[in-house]
Amino acid sequence: MHYYFYITLIQIGLTLFASSSFSWNGSQYWQPTNRETIARIANEMIDIKWQPDKSIRNYAHSNKYTYFSSSKIYTGMAYCQNNPQEDLSEFIHGMNHTNGGITYFGNDCSGFVSICWQLPERYVTRWFHRDMGDGYFYALGAKGKAAFVHLMKGDALNASGRHIRLFDRYVSSGVQLLEQTPDLAQRKTYPFSSLISYQPIRRELLSNSLTVGDLIETSSDQVKVRENACISQNNCRIISYQQKNAEGIVIDGPKTNDTFRWWQIKFNNTKGWVAEGYLRPKQIETNYSYHVYQKNDWHDISYANQLTGFKDDNYIGPIIIGFPFPFFNDCYELLYISSNGFIGFGETNEFDTYRNTTIPTSLPPNNIIAWCWRDLLIRQGKVYYQHANDQFIIQFSNYGEYSGIGTITAQVTLFSNGQIRFQYYASDNHFEMDKASIGLENHSGRTGLQLDSKTITDGMAIDFYSQPIIADKKRLVLQASQQHSQNNLFLATHIPESGNRIQNLKGRILDKIFHQSAIAVFVYRNGWFSKPHINKPFSEIDSDGFWQCDITTQAHDEKSTHIKVLLFNKDYQLNQNINGISSMPSDILSSSIDCLDIFR
Amino acid sequence: MQFITNRFIRSFVILIIIFWFLGKNAACENTYHLVRTVKVDYGREDCHLSRINPDRLHPIVSESFSNDSNGNFYVCDSISNKILKYSKNGSFVNVIRYPDNISPFDMIIDQSNNIYIYDAIQSKVNQINKFGALRQSLAFNPERLSSRGILYISCQKLYIVDSKQRSLEIADLSNGKMKESRHSKRKSAITMGIPAGMDRKYIVSLNRGKEGIINILEKRTQFISFICDGIVSIRFIKEDQHKNFYIQTERIQNNEVVLDIHTFSHDGQLLDSFTIHDNQYPYWTSKLLSIDHAGNIWQFIPNSQFARIHIFHKN
């Protein structure tokens, strides 16, 4: 009896040692990441195909072991509640070097999320609850509010003490989640009625999060707007409730308090602090017009980078565009290329389909640029791409069709200003262009346009132009904020309160003129002073038109009662130092394009 | 004269009552009522279900269930490798034990009462008979599915439908046998839509918060749009023996998630919308309910203390 007991102990010890010699104890650095990276790590663990080199009984949980045969190929990393946990490379190494018998390979639900979120240590579901808002993640809503908040790829749903899973995307039947659950990591859909035990949470340090100046709308009814960024203190009273899709502009934040992340929002009728989970970026409709013409010049790029991997009914990607490409209501930096004649963005639902439909239709695929959507097959053809001066060009050379011997050579060019060009150079062997769907479709499939493919012949080109959306954006912003300039060319989105020496004055230039503009800020305290410094009288303007200025660089600046913001042409030179003079020089004022006076 | 008048008034009142009654019944033809709630205990006996870690990390309970063509209801206990069978009035009938090398993910039953169990670990569909004996296994390539799917049977064909509502044709079920689909290796084996009935497929979509959209794909494609304030999910369930079809939706109302079942006639007329008030599912489950051939609703909710089955019949 004792003999077997000790042998068993030694076996377990050896196995644990073998397993812990390759183990995941946290990411080495806590650093920013993006949603695509989180999803990629999760999907790799879900889609991995593996085969143990010897048959094993792998520990799962609670004295339960899962049998994996060495003669079978499995999809998805094994579930295992062992400590420490393993990431994908460690798991594969373990499976390729096992001696068989009892093993402890894989990870569990919280290990899976810890790895995908690249947390500096392994978290369990109770710790996800305990440490909410303490630096690594924060709450989007309370427990059971998954249906009410705006979830984004890579967010998590946590049931403390039970389970945690990652949000992948919304599907018609609810949500698609990525999770590690017995016996293999998987991708699965759930209705909201089965998510009542879960609290929606979000990782800190994610790129593409909200910023001051963003336009937002609320994600559900009865969204609470609070006096301050908190719940538990006396000064956190609810000052209003906003209905679903209420529009507003972010004017301050973020602040993390009481486990939530807060943004100050200016709505039409009120302003106050709202938890981030109940906000989503405002979608502004964009429309396209097009121009069909004969284009004789052809810039061949078959010397450029070749794209491989095209098969019958597949897609490749993501491919880096090289600039933020505006398409309908969003900007994309990555795209996917279908083997069947279209390019798509975002969710790749049905990007491998060979059946073309009319455009637009809510049926997937959506969010596509269809240059020749029908059942194609690359055959002996080639696909090239090139980045060139705010353009991204994809060339399909001698690209074949599935049922026929015809080929087509064409280019799709994306311009950084949102323009799209299809150029049809040549087709051979009776390529049946008239069977194709040609056009553009937005992410919901409810907006788009289709051209008659029968009218497309060799040598033709189609240019698509997006309609400007700035006017709409400006209208919305100006409705939401009263702190706008006289000519409505810019606005102040955040004005520090009197006495505040920490915060900067922030704003945004509303039109595309910001490339040719300069912003100068002056404060009045017993005279006018240039800010931030007399030697640096102009404020930085970023690539989106946002600007900010430190207006408290000298003693008592925080007590200034009058702030003047002037907009100039970029090449304007201040010919006079503004350093304590009693009134602003009239020539400076008359040289400005626009002006905003702020009184505190 | 007064006698005649009284008689006339009496008759008139009776007629009104009759018309009101008929009218009320006509309007309520497809509404439901709860006929029974069956409590299923956890334990070791045949009629009990199993569970693991009910209050600890990663609890595991039964999550797949289905009806047969006679209206009987089956719950698959994946922990103890057995299926509990209930009669159409909810009485426990018997237990069916299936081989322990099968890891069930979903279950469905054909018209011959063969049971099909989808094993997502082995990527197989197993056909077992009503005694639990394994009759056939069919492996398939899961790469073509975007998520772990749900089983559907239509026109004696077995499909797995993924989260994108793409159906992978797995097998032909003619004569009670499971024969690998002759299309399964072709690209046409996976198609958009959930097959139901002859040459008909359904795809549902959502204009979140505003409307549900049902696309019926057949010779003439129909689009049915129904406005549903606060809608957050929509799912096609099945066609019944009368070719009515059933759509499950969830919507937000008064700070709660509300679960509804909508009945549509074959030509797309909305016949009824019924709210199921008990929709608190504490454990994770992809399927919320099942509808039998007669259109009755069977709701299976595993809880930490016991599981319950609600049976709703049409009036």
Image (cartoon, grey):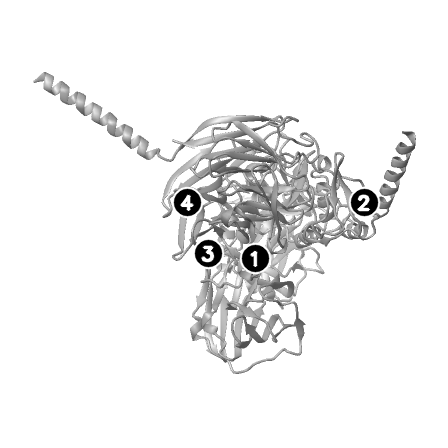
Q: CA distance from mark 3 to mark 4?
A: 16 Å
Tell me whether circle 2 and circle 3 mark residues in contact (CB < 8 Å): no
Q: Amino acid at mark 1?
A: Ser
Q: Nearer the viewer, mark 1 or mark 3?
A: 1
Q: Name the quarter where the N terminus of chain A is drawn.
A: top right
Give me the disc on residue A25. Answer: 2
Left or right of A598, for residue B8:
left
Residue A580: % across, % down: 67, 54
* Disc 4 secondary structure class: strand
Given residues B288 and A42, the one toward you in this image is B288
Label 1 and label 3 in one chain: no
Q: Chain of mark 4?
A: B
Q: Which mark is residue A80?
A: none
Q: Which residue is mark 3?
A: A446
Residues at discs 1 and 2 both on one chain: no
> Label 2 is placed on what type of residue?
Asn
Q: In the rendered image, which residue does mark 4 sit on?
A: B227
The quadrant of the rendering that contains the C terminus of chain A is top right
| Other-residue count near label 3 (Cα within 10 Å), few / some / many at <14 / 14–19 / ≥20 | some
Q: Separation of disc 2 and disc 3 at Cα?
A: 46 Å
